Image (tube, rainbow, N blue to C red):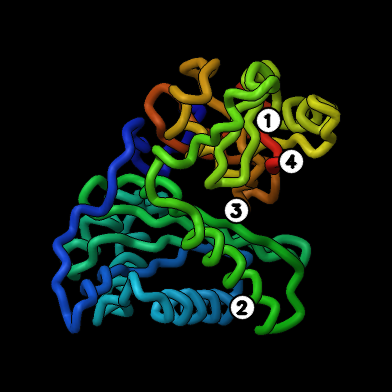
Amino acid sequence: MRKIFLFIAVLGYMLQIQAQTVQQDGKPERRRIAVYITASESVHSDAKRVVNNQIIAVLNQTDKYVLIERNEDFAKQIDNERGIQQSGNVRDDQITDLAKEFGAVAVCIADLGFFMKELSVDMRMVSVTTKTIIPGRTGSSEGSINGVADIRKIVDNATAEMLSTSSGSSNSVSSQNNSANSDKWFILEDYNLMVMKKDVGSGTWSSINQSCKDIALGGYNDWRLPTQSELAILYLEKDEIGGFTNDWYWSSTPYYNYYFSYYWAQSFSSGAQGYDYSNNTNRGRCVSKIHP
């Protein structure tokens, strides 16, 4: 098959973590989460370890989450499973099934890529109950690295983005969608995204990427393809945004094992994500940051 599926469909309805909380000193018990890092072969094991430790440190500083006690054993068991499988890939549902056995209610999964001294960190929080990305719980960051401090800064930015967005969908839609420009773009306020109301057509990754860059809708020249995480958000909000087909859509996120020959895409029929060869044809929808 042209698409190589790496994780299950992201369902089109919004679900929260369904976990009981225990009152302690007047405060609810923090949700138990697991952390798992995936990385391309170009990412050094030391960098992977720094990313893992920094994510754990940041999450432990919040009043919402606490790491499961045996997270290292959990990660090792997933790594062993990856080694057994011929593809070397483990789907999100396999990760969440094991995390549930370890007592977690959610898994923070971070995908790492490294190319030309640039490290990218793409994060998502996945519910072990629904086995889907928790709405609003995604984050990404990238930048050049010259040492551990740079890695930690990139991780901090991605984690902060993931934790700062709302976990519900009802508040993500802005009242600005009733403005004079509502026929041109749709605003997702919680994600700081303006989404074009129409596709830019279908084509290779390069042609669609360039089409977004060439757009000056509303006088703005920063239209672009959404990242892999943002594309998942667009799928979750597709009925509100409107105009999508049931085809596959390109993201701007490369699949680093293939050095920019493959890019992540998502089916707007099933919600599944996979990587696709850049010369194949998929549809495109452009996004921009929200402008005042």
Of labels 3 and 1, earlier in sequence is 3
Residue 163 at x, y percent in the picture: 47, 62
> Marks 3 and 1: CB-CB under 8 Å?
no
* Residue that appears at 74% across and 41% down: 292
What residue sits right under mark 3 in the picture? 257
As measured in the structure, the alpha-carbon distance from the residue carrying label 1 to the one carrying label 2 is 30 Å
Dot 4 crowding, Cα within 10 Å, few <14, some 14–19, many 20+: few
Question: Which kind of residue does numbered mark 2 sit on?
Answer: Arg
Q: Secondary structure at mark 4?
A: loop
Q: Amino acid at mark 1?
A: Cys
Q: Which residue is mark 1?
A: 286
Q: Amino acid at mark 4?
A: His
At x 53% / y 75%, what residue is drawn? Answer: 51
Q: Which residue is mark 2?
A: 152
Q: Which residue is mark 4?
A: 291
SS at mark 3 in the image: helix
First in sequence, mark 1 or 4: give its number: 1
